[in-house]
Amino acid sequence: MSTGTGTYDQQWLSEPQVTLTDEFKTQAARLTQLTADTGDPAEAHTNAAMIAATRQSLDQISGALRRLSTGSYGSCEKCGTAIPWERLDILPHARFCVPCQQRQAR
């Protein structure tokens, strides 16, 4: 939960840590499967796209886990305000609050 200072308590932070760690394991296993050579050249393009997306997901999850360990998780990397817990619940690797994410996407 958010406190008056815009930070999150340790009990609340344990949930995204478990979720992110589980998702990291799942994505790492998926990457291992995708990088196994199937020998089918018809699948090469699709497989390359799936590998790139999986690696991006692993990077995002790793970043969120790093922010959890350094105590910066839940703070927008642009403006420093607290990212609403509803956003983090839906997108646990979120780096930006909604307004900053919208500006970033433009």
Image (spheres, rainbow, N blue to C red):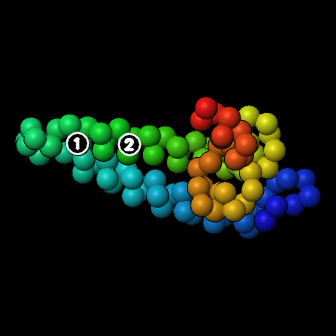
**For the point 61% across and 32% down, which residue is it?**
106
Nearest the viewer among 4 and 102 is: 102
User: Which x, y percent locates residue 31?
Assistant: 31, 47
Q: Secondary structure at mark 2?
A: helix
At label 2, the amino acid type is Ala
**For the point 48% across and 61% down, which residue is it?**
22
User: Which x, y percent locates residue 1?
Assistant: 78, 65
The picture quadrant where one finds residue 46 is top left
User: Which x, y percent locates residue 5?
Assistant: 90, 53
Residue pointed to by mark 2: 53
54 relative to 49 in the view: left or right = right
**For the point 81% across and 44% down, which residue is it?**
81
Nearest the viewer among 53 and 105 is: 105
Q: Secondary structure at mark 1?
A: helix
Above or below 20: residue 42: above
**What is the residue that sits farthest to the right in this orientation?**
4
Above or below 2: residue 31: above
At label 1, the amino acid type is Thr
Residue pointed to by mark 1: 46
User: How many residues crowd mark 1 within 10 Å: few (<14), some (14–19), many (20+)?
Assistant: few
User: How many residues crowd mark 2 within 10 Å: few (<14), some (14–19), many (20+)?
Assistant: some
Do we see residue 69 in this rendering? no
The picture quadrant where one finds residue 43 is top left
Distance from disc 2 to disc 1, alpha carbons, whole Å, reads 11 Å
Do we see residue 105 in this rendering? yes
35 relative to 77 in the view: left or right = left
27 relative to 19 in the view: left or right = left
**For the point 79% across and 58% down, which residue is it?**
8
